[in-house]
Amino acid sequence: MTACIVGWAHSPFGKLADETLESLIVKVATDALDHAGIGPDDVDEIVLGHFNAGFSAQDFTASLVLQADDRFRFKPATRVENACATGSAAVRQGIRAIEAKAARVVLVVGAEQMTTTPGPQIGQNLLRASYLPEDGDTPAGFAGVFGKIAAAYYQRHGDQTDALARIAAKNHKNGVDNIYAQMRKDFGFEFCRTESERNPYVAGPLKRTDCSLVSDGAAAIVLTDATTALSMRRAVAFRANEHVQDFLPMSKRDILLFEGCEEAWARALRNAGITLDDLSFVETHDCFTIAELIEYEAMGLAKRGEGGKIALEGQTEKGGRLPVNPSGGLKAKGHPIGATGVSMHALTAAQLTGEAGGIQVEGAKIGGIFNMGGAAVANYVSILERIK
Ligand SMILES: CC(=O)CC(=O)SCCNC(=O)CCNC(=O)[C@H](O)C(C)(C)COP(=O)(O)OP(=O)(O)OC[C@H]1O[C@@H](n2cnc3c(N)ncnc32)[C@H](O)[C@@H]1OP(=O)(O)O
C-alpha cells in the first residue's frame, strides 16, 4: 500500500530565542493537520524525530506532541533517532505503520533546538553520532570529521576548492528565496572560495561557508494510505522509500565512496522504476559541501572523482540538468537535526503540488530526497510524485 503525504507544516529555521522545543513541536503538529484538513481525532499514530544527544534537558519527548491537543491522548506516540537522518527515520516509521495497515493516518514531527547550547558543547553533542573510539575527540566536532573526509578526497582526486565554493554559493543563492531559511544571503562564489576573517577555515580544507548551520526548528507531515489520500485536498505519493544502514566506524569502509548512499539510491530508483533523468530536482544532505559533492557521485549523477566537475558546470543549479537543493539545503535553510529529514519531505511535497513559493522548481513532477546520519551511516532515499 503506497503511503502519501497529504499535509505539512514548517517553522522558520534559525536562532529562535522565543521558542522552546515544546512550542516548536506544538506549532507544526497543529499547522500540519490544518494544512491536511483533518483534526487530531483522525490521527492513528504519532512519530517524533528528535536527536537530542544533549541539546535539550527534556528527553523522552514523544509525548510533547500530545501537548498540541488533548484529543491526542491515548494515541500511540514514539520518538525515533538515527543521527542527522532522524527526521527521515521518523517518516519511514510512519510509512511502515501505514504499509502494515496498522494505521491509516500518521502525524510525523521532527524538531530540534540547538542554539541554546554553548558553542564548544554543540560540536561534542554532534560527535555522539560518530564512532567514539575513533572520532570522539575530533577537534571542531563533525566539521572535523568531514574536514578529514575532504582532505582525503583532495588527496585522491585533487583540489576541490572551486567546486566546493560553487556548491556553497549555489545553496546560499537558492536559500535567499526560501521563507523558512535561516540564512537568506547570496554570498557569491568569490566569498565562498576565499579565506577571510568572515570566512575562516574551520577544519581541514573546509571553510565556514562549507558548513551547514546550527539551528532551531521543526517540521511536520501528515501521512495516509493512498485511498484515504485521494479523498483529501492533495496527495503526494512515495514511489520509493529506502533505508540502508552502513558500519559506523569509518575505518571499516572506503569513506570517500558513501556506499550506503549509493545503495539507497540504487534501490530507490529501481523500486520506483525510474532513472535520475526522470527527477525534476533533488534535496540532498549537504551537511558539508564535500558531502554534497560525494553524493553527486554516489547517486550516479557523476563518475567517481568527477562530482566537482558537474558542480563547476552548473549542472545542479536551478535551470541545470538536475537542480539540487532548491531549498538552499542544510547550508542556507539550516540543519536542526531532528527536523531536517521531515523538512526535506515537506518542502519536496510542496514543490510537487506547486506550493513552494519562491523556491518553486517550475513544472516539478518527481522529486528525490537523500538524508544521511553520520558520515553516510544512516542513508534514506525517498522518491515522491504527486497523484492528486
Ligand atoms: C551528525 C550527523 O549525523 C551528520 C551531519 O549532518 S553532520 C552536521 C551537523 N552540523 C554541524 O556540524 C554544524 C556545523 N556548523 C558549525 O558548527 C558552525 O556553523 C561553524 C563552526 C561552521 C561556525 O560557527 P561559529 O564560528 O561559532 O560562527 P558564529 O560565531 O556562530 O557566527 C559568526 C558569523 O558567521 C555566520 N555563520 C555561522 N555559521 C555559518 C555557516 N555554517 N555558514 C555561513 N555562515 C555562518 C554567522 O551568521 C555570523 O555572521 P555575522 O557575523 O554576520 O552575524
Image: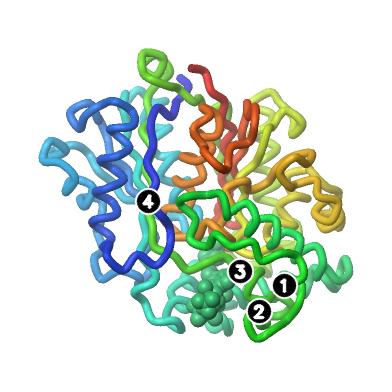
| Circles 2, 1 touching at the beta carbon (< 8 Å) | yes
- Which is more toward the observer, 106 or 283? 283
* First reached walking from the N terminus: tag 1 or tag 3: 1
Q: CA distance from mark 1 to mark 3?
A: 14 Å
| Circles 3, 4 touching at the beta carbon (< 8 Å) | no
Which numbered marker is on residue 211? 3
Q: Is residue 141 visible?
A: no
Mark closer to the observer (3, 4)? 4
Q: Which residue is mark 2?
A: 199
The kind of secondary structure element at disc 2 is loop
Which numbered marker is on residue 191? 1
Q: Is residue 248 visible?
A: yes
Q: CA distance from mark 2 to mark 3?
A: 11 Å
Query: Is ligand 1 less than 8 Å from the beta carbon at label 2?
Result: yes
Query: Is ligand 1 less than 8 Å from the beta carbon at label 3?
Result: yes
Q: Which quadrant of the frame does ligand 1 lie within?
A: bottom right
Q: Is residue 11 left or right of residue 294?
A: left
Mark closer to the observer (2, 1)? 1
Q: Residue at x 62, y 77 (%)?
A: 144
